[in-house]
């Protein structure tokens, strides 16, 4: 890493994307017949509502979400993911999101996507945005297969702050190393990290984040539409 003195962090789901890649991945597997609709669809919706309400138990959700990854070889998962990218993710990529990221990259800012969604789902999406650095919930791998368990601290709520500190610390940095830092997010779940950057930005925010942003004088922007 060179002498970047500005840091730009981006939430992914419902921020750079016009939907939730976590939720859509489960729906994709249901529609492919990989997951049993009766068993998984209601539960997927339930977790999504809990997330939006700020009440998600991340460990309970990860047990649900990662279990299917442990049942299939990596080659099959990668083939499904390529189809998922083509049919589900690319239509969700926000043009204004791409423009926002590319503006920071052109300025020479150090950029990272910081998402609770696991790295298997999100690594190809980060590449789609041209972002080299991804802080996501990491997955435990044994003998080339996912075990269905997370590895390390889930990148969720306070965990985003922890994972960011670990990543920067590994490069001899802290948030205070940067003269300016941004975090763009739509969700109340991201308040712990939004509170720590010099430029918190609420993007098409949920109701609670909108109220918090207005009360604290944070920027509120929309990346929706063309």
Image (cartoon, helix red, strand yellow):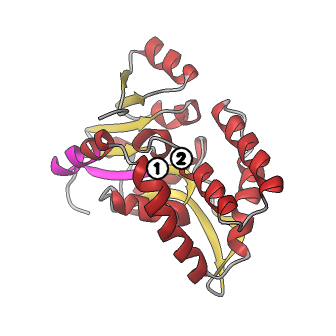
In the image, 166 versus 51, the foreground residue is: 51
User: Is 204 within the magenta?
Assistant: no
In the image, 184 versus 216, the foreground residue is: 184
Secondary-structure class at tag 2: helix
Read off the residue under disc 2.
Answer: 160
- Dot label at residue 114: 1
Q: Position of residue 169 (x, y in %)?
A: 43, 57
Q: In the rendered image, which quarter is residue 140 located in?
A: bottom right
Up/down of 29 relative to 93, above or below: below
Up/down of 92 relative to 85, above or below: above
Determine contact: label 2, label 1, CB under 8 Å: yes
| Residue drawn at point x = 51 percent, y = 50 percent | 115
> Left or right: where does residue 225 sit relative to residue 39?
left
Q: In the rendered image, which quarter is residue 27 located in?
A: bottom right
In the image, 177 versus 112, the foreground residue is: 112
Q: Where are the magenta residues, as a range?
A: 101-113
Up/down of 181 relative to 41, above or below: above
């Amino acid at each position: 890493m060179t002498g970047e003195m500005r840091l730009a962090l981006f939430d992914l789901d419902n921020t750079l994307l016009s939907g939730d890649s976590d939720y859509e991945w489960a729906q994709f597997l249901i529609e492919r017949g990989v997951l049993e609709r009766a068993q998984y669809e209601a539960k997927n919706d339930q977790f999504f509502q809990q997330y939006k309400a700020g009440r998600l138990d991340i460990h309970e959700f990860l047990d649900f979400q990662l279990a299917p990854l442990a049942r299939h070889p990596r080659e099959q998962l990668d083939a499904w993911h390529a189809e998922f990218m083509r049919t589900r993710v690319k239509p969700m990529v926000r043009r204004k999101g791409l423009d926002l990221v590319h503006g920071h990259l052109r300025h020479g800012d150090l950029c990272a996507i910081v998402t609770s969604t696991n790295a298997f789902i999100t690594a190809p999406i980060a590449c789609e945005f041209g972002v080299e650095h991804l802080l996501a919930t990491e997955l435990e791998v044994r003998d080339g297969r996912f075990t269905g368990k997370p590895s390390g601290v889930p990148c969720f709520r306070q965990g985003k702050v922890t994972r960011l500190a670990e990543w920067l610390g590994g490069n001899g940095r802290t948030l205070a190393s940067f003269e300016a830092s941004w975090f763009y997010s739509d969700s109340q779940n991201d308040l712990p990290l939004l509170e720590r950057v010099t430029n918190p930005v609420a993007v098409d925010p949920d109701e609670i984040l909108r109220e918090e942003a207005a009360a604290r004088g944070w920027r509120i922007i929309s990346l929706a539409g063309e």
